[in-house]
Image (cartoon, helix red, strand yellow):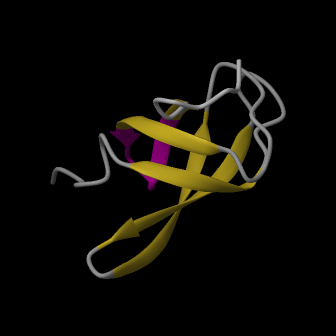
Amino acid sequence: MNDPVAGLTGTLTSPIRGAGMLGEVLVAIRGGTELYIARATEPIPAGATVLIISVNPGRIVDVVPWIELGSTEI
C-alpha cells in the first residue's frame, strides 16, 4: 500500500531532538488531519514545517525541514 503523505508537508507537534530520535508530525490529508511518527537526521523543533520524503511501515515517516520560498529564515 502506498501512503499518499509522501511529498506532503506537515507540522511537527513534538520535536525531533536528534538523529535516530522520533517526534510526531501532523499532516492535512483526506479532508482532515492525521498524526504520523516522524524521524530525521538532524534536530528539528516542534512547530517547524517539514517535508515528508518517505513512508515506512508503522506510520513512520522520514522528514526534512521545509523552508518556503520567500522565507527569510536561514
Q: Report the magenta residues as a range.
A: 55-62
- 57 lies left or right of 31: right
Residue name at image x 22 percent, y 55 percent: 4
Please state which of residues 56 and 49 is positioned toward the viewer in this rendering: 49
Counting from the top left corner in percent of width and height, residue 32 is at 38, 81
- 53 lies left or right of 40: left
Counting from the top left corner in percent of width and height, residue 69 is at 46, 30
Locate the C terminus and report the quarter of the image it occupies: top right
Q: Is 28 located above or below residue 16 in the figure?
A: below
Please state which of residues 73 and 24 is positioned toward the viewer in this rendering: 73
Counting from the top left corner in percent of width and height, residue 61 is at 47, 43
Q: Is residue 59 magenta?
A: yes
Q: Is 13 located above or below residue 43 in the figure?
A: below
Please state which of residues 23 and 7 is positioned toward the viewer in this rendering: 7
Residue name at image x 78 percent, y 27 percent: 43
Counting from the top left corner in percent of width and height, residue 24 is at 65, 55
Residue name at image x 17 percent, y 50 percent: 2
- Outermost left residue: 1
Residue name at image x 24 percent, y 54 percent: 3
Q: Is 57 located above or below residue 70 in the figure?
A: below
